[in-house]
């Protein structure tokens, strides 16, 4: 038995399940929630939802052209496309983009299926947490994404984790060294992806560095 293929198949199954769950979550949102702020600075729920399916809807050639328009700035490109698509697609369509592409093989440039799952999980929490939806990511999916956290990924996402040790209080998981920061594993995952969390979700001397005032 090829354990590598088994692992890849498990990650792909987790991605499909996560996208379907998030599509259901989006379909259940009241109209006002779509204009609520997310954890992604400057984006409402609708921009995050639009961004999550960008990789399915824009072929490589189109993305390359859009990147040229943005003068090579990936963040500028993704922001412009998210705002455009959020303005032109209905909430029902944005949810359907995820559900209809649950098995799409998209992954980040030079990334892995596990990082594709991370993209879905983190952006799903970007939506759910500010809306206080109390979504709990299934442990098998969460552990796959937690295993992708590294000093390199923290730097890429702008997470200032120097001198801080993340300690999950609901799973056997930790990362880094230094002043302990405690919280639910999925909240610490958001910290590792550079997010600022609502007050009260983290504990420890360093909690103020990663929560909103």
Image (spheres, rainbow, N blue to C red):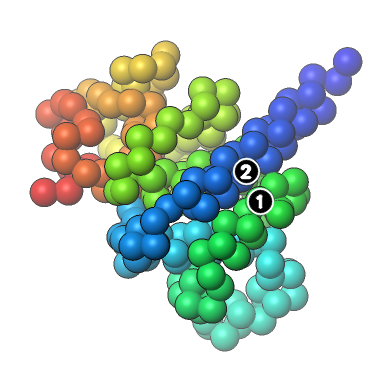
Asked whether the viewer can see residue 65, the reply is yes
Image quarter hosting the N terminus = top right
Residues packed near mark 2 inside 10 Å, few (<14), some (14 to 19) or many (20 plus): many
Image coordinates of residue 71 in percent, x first then y, are 53, 82
> Circles 2 and 1: CB distance less than 8 Å?
yes
Check residue 99 in the rendering and tell me which mark sits there, or answer none. Answer: 1
Image coordinates of residue 57 in percent, x first then y, are 68, 67
**Mark 2 sits on what residue?**
20
Position of residue 98 relative to residue 18, above or below, is: below
Image coordinates of residue 19 in percent, x first then y, are 61, 45
Picture residue at 74% right of the left edge, 51% below the top: 104
Q: How many marks?
A: 2
Quadrant in which residue 182 is drawn:
top left
Which of 33/114 is in front? 33
Give the mark, 2 or 1, whose residue is nearer the N terminus: 2
Q: Secondary structure at mark 2?
A: helix
User: In the shown orientation, is residue 25 left or right of residue 192?
Assistant: right
Image coordinates of residue 13 in percent, x first then y, are 71, 33
Picture residue at 69% right of the left edge, 61% below the top: 56
Position of residue 78 relative to residue 16, above or below, is: below
Picture residue at 35% right of the left edge, 35% below the top: 134
Residues packed near mark 1 inside 10 Å, few (<14), some (14 to 19) or many (20 plus): many
| C-alpha separation, residue under disc 2 versus residue under disc 1 | 5 Å
């Amino acid at each position: 038995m090829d354990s590598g293929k088994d692992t890849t198949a498990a990650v792909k199954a987790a991605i499909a399940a996560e996208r379907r769950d998030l599509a259901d979550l989006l379909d259940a949102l009241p109209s006002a929630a779509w204009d609520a702020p997310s954890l992604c600075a400057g984006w409402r729920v609708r921009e995050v939802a639009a961004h999550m399916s960008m990789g399915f809807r824009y072929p490589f050639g189109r993305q390359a052209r859009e990147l040229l328009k943005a003068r090579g700035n990936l963040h500028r490109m993704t922001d412009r496309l998210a705002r455009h698509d959020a303005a032109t697609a209905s909430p029902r369509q944005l949810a359907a983009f995820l559900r209809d592409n649950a098995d799409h093989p998209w992954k980040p440039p030079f990334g892995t299926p596990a990082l594709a799952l991370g993209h879905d999980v983190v952006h799903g929490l970007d939506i759910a947490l500010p809306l206080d939806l109390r979504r709990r990511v299934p442990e098998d999916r969460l552990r796959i994404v937690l295993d992708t956290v590294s000093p390199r990924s923290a730097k890429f996402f702008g997470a200032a984790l120097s001198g801080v040790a993340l300690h999950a209080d609901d799973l056997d998981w930790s990362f880094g060294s230094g002043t302990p920061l405690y919280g639910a594993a999925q909240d610490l995952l958001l910290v590792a992806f550079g997010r600022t969390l609502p007050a009260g979700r983290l504990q420890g001397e360093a909690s103020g560095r990663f929560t909103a005032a």
